[in-house]
């Protein structure tokens, strides 16, 4: 079994050192490494996503590669993973691993996460699952996973659904497959893309002033995601401005600032009347990823709502 390994994580470690630091990794797979970028994941951006997705698309086509492991900082792995899941047409396993503790820490978690990640990548049942994250013995679909704690090793959770499986000392148990569109069933692709449409996230709160909505539109946002209070709500003033933005052709998605839950269409807000999209299960960061890709295809609000229901 061969696995490619391409780190995009911050820090000073070369991929060869990361692989060498994990005892018995070579007993699981024949691994070759490639450094796509070396940044803190807080600096992740659209250009790197396009570069990484395009390289990943090439690598998975290689008959010599059975699976891909991507090392990634934990801050934005949930966004990168979802982006790659939406644009990479393959049944081959793609596993993202990271670490909450630095390599110098007592009980650093990086080596065991990488070991478990490779075990997941080569495990029977990994094919066709799309992009998953593996940290702290837990496997999560990139589409579902959220970083929930600033420093805890038990930080990654599939908040609305539960994990994809577990990997304990390399023994892998898979749970239910992800029925949402992704990978080979996704309509999205990075082929021919040199940039992504601008989508801004605006955080709602008590006393929310609508000025930032106007500013984002003036600065060229093609889409807006509101990290709404509760079920994707915002002040009347903000709602009036997003409605105006929607009428002017900016696609507005109502998500929630809450840790979990579904934003329902036409529940508290009349999305049909106001021309808005409800994010369903996707948090603001994931909504932004899907909206950027959706806007490469269409600006039709009904079509984009269907995407939010299906992906
Ligand atoms: N800010 C760092 C990052 O996401 C956190 C450390 C880590 O998770 O690698 O890259």
Image (spheres, rainbow, N blue to C red):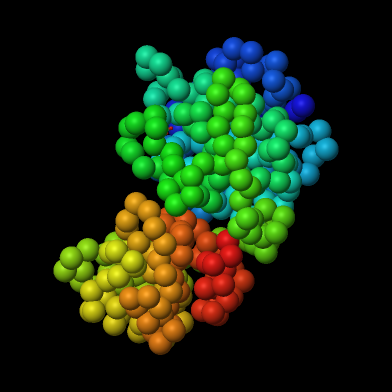
- Residue located at (48% from left, 45% from top): 162
Residue 162 in the image: above or below residue 208: above
Q: Residue 59, image x and y in percent?
A: 73, 40
Q: Please identify the residue farthest to the right as the structure is shown.
A: 63
Does the image show residue 153?
Answer: yes
Describe residue 253's horizontal placement relative to residue 233 as left or right.
Answer: right
Residue 61 in the image: above or below residue 11: below
Q: In the picture, residue 43 is in which quadrant? A: top left
- Location of the C terminus by quadrant is bottom right
- Residue located at (29% from left, 64% from top): 230
- Residue located at (44% from left, 84% from top): 272
Q: Quadrant of ligand 1?
A: top left
Q: In the picture, residue 202 is in which quadrant? A: bottom left
Residue 297 in the image: above or below residue 15: below
- Residue located at (40% from left, 23% from top): 102
Q: Nearer the viewer, residue 189 or 40?
A: 189
Q: Residue 244, image x and y in percent?
A: 35, 84
Residue 10 in the image: above or below residue 276: above
Q: Please identify the residue farthest to the left as the structure is shown.
A: 207
How many numbered marks appear? 0
Q: Residue 112, image x and y in percent?
A: 52, 21
Does the image show residue 96?
Answer: no
Describe residue 104's horizontal placement relative to residue 24 as left or right.
Answer: left
Describe residue 228's horizontal placement relative to residue 37 as left or right.
Answer: left
Q: Please identify the residue farthest to the top as the structure is shown.
A: 23
Q: Residue 12, image x and y in percent?
A: 47, 24
Q: Nearer the viewer, residue 12 or 5?
A: 5
- Location of the N terminus by quadrant is top right
């Amino acid at each position: 079994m061969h696995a490619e390994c391409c780190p995009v994580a911050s820090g000073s470690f070369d991929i060869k050192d990361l692989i060498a630091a994990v005892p018995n990794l070579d007993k699981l797979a024949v691994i070759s490494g490639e450094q796509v970028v070396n940044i803190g994941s807080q600096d992740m951006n659209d250009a790197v996503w396009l570069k990484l997705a395009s390289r990943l698309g090439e690598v998975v086509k290689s008959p010599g590669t059975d699976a891909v492991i991507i090392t990634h900082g934990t801050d934005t792995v949930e966004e990168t993973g979802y982006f790659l899941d939406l644009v990479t047409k393959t049944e081959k396993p793609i596993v993202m691993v990271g670490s909450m503790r630095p390599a110098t820490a007592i009980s650093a978690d990086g080596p065991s996460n990488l070991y478990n990640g490779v075990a997941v990548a080569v495990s029977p049942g990994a094919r066709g699952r799309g992009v998953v994250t593996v940290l702290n013995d837990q496997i999560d679909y990139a589409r579902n996973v959220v970083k929930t704690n600033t420093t805890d090793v038990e930080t990654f959770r599939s908040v609305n659904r539960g994990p994809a499986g577990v990997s304990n000392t390399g023994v892998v148990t898979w749970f239910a497959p992800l029925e949402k569109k992704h990978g080979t069933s996704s309509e999205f692709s990075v082929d021919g893309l040199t940039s992504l449409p601008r989508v801004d996230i605006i955080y709602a709160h008590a006393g929310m002033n609508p000025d930032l909505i106007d500013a984002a539109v003036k600065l060229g946002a093609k889409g807006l995601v509101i990290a709404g209070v509760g079920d994707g709500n915002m002040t009347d003033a903000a709602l009036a401005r997003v409605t105006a933005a929607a009428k002017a052709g900016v696609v507005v998605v109502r998500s929630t600032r809450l840790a979990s839950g579904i934003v329902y269409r036409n529940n508290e807000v009349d999305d049909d009347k106001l021309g808005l999209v409800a994010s369903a299960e996707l948090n603001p960061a994931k909504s932004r990823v899907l909206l950027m890709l959706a806007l490469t295809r269409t600006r039709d609000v009904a079509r984009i709502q269907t995407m939010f229901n299906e992906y």
